Image: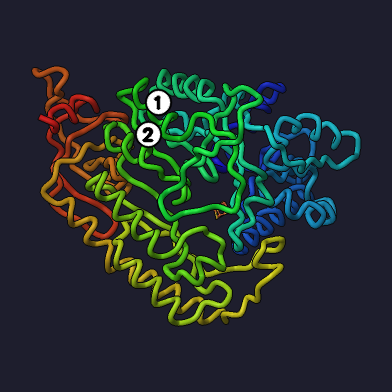
Amino acid sequence: MNINDMEIVLSIMKNSGYSEVVDVPESAEIIFINTCAIRDNAEQKVWQRLNYFWFLKRHWKSNVATGRSQSLHAPKVVVLGCMAERLKDKILDADKMVDVVCGPDAYRDLPRLLEEVDYGQKGINTLLSLEETYADINPVRISKNSVSAFVSVMRGCNNMCSFCIVPFTRGRERSRPVESIVKEVAELWKEGVKEVTLLGQNVNSYNDASGLEKDVEPGSNWRFSEGFSSIAKVKKMGLRFADLLDRLSLEFPEMRFRYTSPHPKDFPDELLFVMRDRHNICKCIHLPAQTGSSTILERMRRGYTREAYLDLVHKIRSIIPDVGISSDFISGFCGETEEDHADTLSLLKAVGFDMAYMFAYSMREKTHAHRNYVDDVPEEIKQRRLTELIETFRESTGQCYDSQIGTIQLVLVEGPNKRAPDTQLMGKSDRGHRVLFANLPIPDRDDVNTQRNPVVGDYVEVHISRSTRASLFGEALAITKLSSFYNIMDE
Ligand code: SF4
């Protein structure tokens, strides 16, 4: 999400006449730091970087004298993103460390805020918006050579999970119109992008109501996954996430689509069916569980029980066989007992995740938990439980990788393997696994008389022969088209 936000910021700055992006902060005239406030250690890192930029500001003249900087004035430091909203007073009070504080919905205001600095003011705008989606802004891609890109389809979150600060820093949910997304993807396709990841804080709650009549009643037909609920009011229902995927996958049949980050409550059957039916929608689902204990889930205000979560996993796997599932877990949330923790370990084992992101709980100000609960699990217990979560995940994930041995996977080549750049290539399978294979000439199915080495952006059929817990290894068989590969597999 932050990469995509930076691409939007770059586009806004470019349109205001700032044309050049420098490689190092030492030679910059404006330094942007895009922040995340979700976990305490992310915030600590931001303060460390700000201290370094403060050092650069104070030593700007000597940097110019030694040729390290060609900037005509000391760099302006701009704090963007979640932390801007949450800590604006603290950031601005920090002497002359920061010049501009700009929240995630105020990026259009950046040129004006920077001008205020020229007149000796500090620039600040952290207003959240009910409408801003930056739909009309064409992001400037940071990594021009990459075959994959991010496209933001909605912003904000209406759920009020008790541990989470996102609704306070990113505001309410709003979705971009489908047409603006199709237009952006078409541009990316022209640039040679082969894989798009659709982004949103609650991406599968996507709801493009822009085409609805004003007097349409709030959508009583909004469907959640079975056994799931939300404390957020259901809005009027427009085009949903399944509709968006349906449109994109049909319009761009040779492009792969992924998405993140979804909430498990928004997996109605039609979303699972469109994923099953379209070869270019990757068969991997991020399904944040957070904990395996129904008691803690209730305290987290997640809107489901352990049983409902496991039923959903079962349903997903019955509709989309061979789907990869990943998740998020928090250890040591307020009131978590050893029994609750054991429930999380058993859920990890029962599901067998391809990937899991696991963190020890850190309480954030403003959240429901901060106002109502006590952060009562001692740090050493949180860390011990986190270690146990990681170990349990590692033991079970091996099976996910092993299950791919003997299969043929379609791999999108991303570049050389960094550990063996002259001899091996690396790419991702549909399920999101990292796949490594020898860089040798292979047949090109589009041109039967040709053998050539695969290049970045090619789809390659790879026969998987070996796995570790983080990678698959195999033999490249042929370069192909995405649609040709699945037509052959379907026969
Ligand atoms: Fe935070 Fe995700 Fe819950 Fe929204 S759904 S409040 S982003 S954890």
Question: In the image, what residue type sits under mark 2?
Answer: Phe
Quadrant of the rendered image containing residue 129: top right
Give the left or right position of residue 81, taking residue 355 as reference. Answer: right
On residue 257, the disc is 2
Kindly identify the residue that appears in the image at 65 percent across and 26 percent down.
215
Quick one: label 2, few (<14), some, or many (20+) residues within 10 Å?
Answer: many
Element type where label 2 sits in the image: strand
Q: CA distance from mark 1 to mark 2?
A: 8 Å
Q: Are marks 1 and 2 in contact (CB under 8 Å)?
A: yes
Which residue in the structure is indicated by mark 1? 248
Kindly identify the residue that appears in the image at 47 percent across and 59 percent down.
304
Vertical relation: 191 (above or below) 411? above
Q: Please tell me which residue lies in front, 46 or 152.
A: 152
Give the left or right position of residue 185, taking residue 48 as reference. Answer: left
Position in image of residue 229 (x %, y %): 51, 53
Position in image of residue 101 (x %, y %): 76, 44
Kindly identify the residue that appears in the image at 46 percent across and 42 percent down.
223
Find out if the beta carbon at label 1 lies less than 8 Å from the nearest ligand 1 atom.
no
On residue 172, the disc is none
Element type where label 1 sits in the image: helix
Lower sequence index among marks 1 and 2:
1
Position in image of residue 10 (x %, y %): 62, 30
Q: Please state, as top left, top right, bottom left or bottom right, where the N terminus lies in the image.
A: top right
Vertical relation: 364 (above or below) 184? below
Q: Residue furthest right?
A: 120
Q: Please tell me which residue lies in front, 357 or 110.
A: 357
Find out if the beta carbon at label 2 lies less than 8 Å from the nearest ligand 1 atom.
no
Residue 65 can be seen, yes or no: no
